[in-house]
Amino acid sequence: MNKLIIVAHPDDEILWFSSQFKDASNVVVCFSDVIDNPAPGYPFIGDKRRRFFEEQPYDHFYSLDLEEPGTFGLVNFDTAKITDTGVKIPDPKTQKKYNQTFEIIVDKIKPILSGKDIVYTHNPWGEYGHPDHILVHRAVTKIAKEKGIPVYWSTYVSDWTIKFAYKTLYTSKVDLITHNTDNQVFNTLLDLYKKHEIWTWNNVYRLPSMEHFLSCAEKDKDGGHEVDDLALPFMWVDPVKAFFPGKKRAEI
């Protein structure tokens, strides 16, 4: 089977898709550089990420080397609104960049999806709550639908996004895949991420023993049936501990 994984940022592929990494025909990362408008950027992270890809050992793993739209931390997912390109961004300038980035990614991934049997990508709530993840999800599902390719999403979720997750899903057409995670792939790339100072999660994180992938009809911005009677196998993560160690959510 010709599998494809498409993720937003370097390290997303092992945080959310380690179980599929080795079997994939290609693992594609969208972003390298981070802009500083208005969310805080990270000096030289693009160069560090490029050096990582020059050193990492997997031939099927590469980056599109695009610029992030700078959305992290701008959305309150308790009240977030679904849009055609992902999720509504409160800052107009960043919203414009977000929409432009969506079109760029759609254009870039069209040829990559050709001939694929199945594609894995982020879920429509952005795992712990990253608008870039939702943007990539929307771009991938748009092209995959046109090509008739089934799309499976990670089921990782956090307390930041659980309400939004239920708002995005229909109760119909649910399919579930479960696989054991791959600690060998995870640790190999983790060591390189740390070496290049671009590991974005906390240093004590350990993979769960297995992870789930869901194929499910989405609710669009105009409405649909919310999931209220479906027990989904969510995989819980804690972004507060990841990004703000020692603090509680109320302190962020």
Image: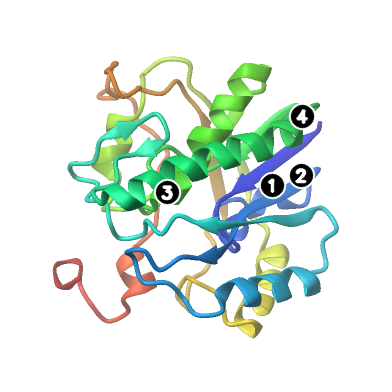
Q: Secondary structure at mark 4?
A: loop
- Say which element carries label 1: helix
Contact, mark 2 vs mark 1 (Cβ under 8 Å) = yes
Q: Earlier in the sequence, mark 4 or mark 1?
A: 1
Q: How far apart are labels 3 and 2 at the CA level?
A: 30 Å
Closer to us: mark 4 or mark 1? 4
Q: Residues within 10 Å of mark 2 (few under 14, many from 20)?
A: some
Corner quadrant of residue 186 = bottom right
The amino acid at mark 1 is Gln
- Mark earlier in primary sequence (3, 1): 1
Residue nearest the viewer, comparing 179 with 42:
42
Mark nearer the viewer, 2 or 4: 4
Read off the residue under disc 1: 20
Q: Which residue is identified by label 2?
A: 24
List the residue tagged with mark 4.
116
| Tag 3–tag 2 contact (CB < 8 Å) | no
In this rendering, position of residue 243 left or right of residue 133: left
Q: Disc 4 marks which amino acid?
A: Lys
Residue closest to the far left: 250
Answer few, some or many: residues within 10 Å of disc 3's Cα (few below 14, many 20 plus, some between 14 and 19).
some
Q: Report the residue marked by disc 3.
A: 97
